[in-house]
Amino acid sequence: MKRKREVSSDDLRPEYDFDYSKAVRGKYYRRLISEGANVVVLEPDVAKAFHDSQAVNDALRSLLKVAQSSRLRTRSSRTVRKRTAA
C-alpha cells in the first residue's frame, strides 16, 4: 500500500507573505542616524532590573552624578612634592 504524500498547507495569511527579493538593506539607516537614535543591548540579567528605557536613563544619570561628585572630593588641593634623588 502506498503512503499518501503530505501536502504542506500554508497557514499564513496572504498579507504576511514577504518577498525578500524586493527588500532594501539599511532603508531607514540615514533617518535613524539623523534623528540621533542609539541602540544599546543589555545583558538579560541587567535588563530584568529595568522596566523600560526611562528607568535605565534615570539610573545612568544618577550614577553620573555620583561619579562627578566623588571626583571633586578626591582631588587634593595640596601641591605634589617632587622627590629628590638621594
Image (tube, rainbow, N blue to C red):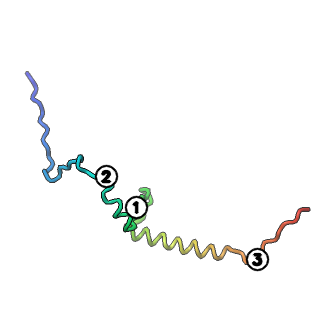
Extreme residue in the right direction: 86
Extreme residue in the bottom direction: 77
Question: Is label 3 in contact with label 2 (beta carbons under 8 Å)?
Answer: no
Q: Which residue position holds label 2?
A: 25
Name the spot of residue 39 as percent of width and height, x first. 40, 61
Residue 68 is left or right of residue 85, and the answer is left
Residue at the location (37% across, 68% down)?
A: 35
Q: Earlier in the sequence, mark 1 or mark 2?
A: 2
Name the spot of residue 84 as percent of width and height, x first. 88, 65
Q: CA separation, marks 1 and 2?
A: 18 Å
Question: Foreground residue, 53 or 86?
Answer: 86
The amino acid sitting under disc 2 is: Arg
The amino acid sitting under disc 1 is: Val
* Total numbered labels placed on residues in the image: 3
Secondary structure at numbered mark 3: loop
Dividing the image into 4 quarters, which one contains the C terminus? bottom right
Name the spot of residue 9 as percent of width and height, x first. 12, 41
Residue 55 is left or right of residue 27, and the answer is right
Q: CA separation, marks 3 and 1?
A: 43 Å
Residue at the location (30% across, 57% down)?
A: 27
Q: Earlier in the sequence, mark 3 or mark 2?
A: 2
Dividing the image into 4 quarters, which one contains the N terminus? top left
Please tell me the numbered disc located at residue 78.
Answer: 3
The amino acid sitting under disc 3 is: Arg
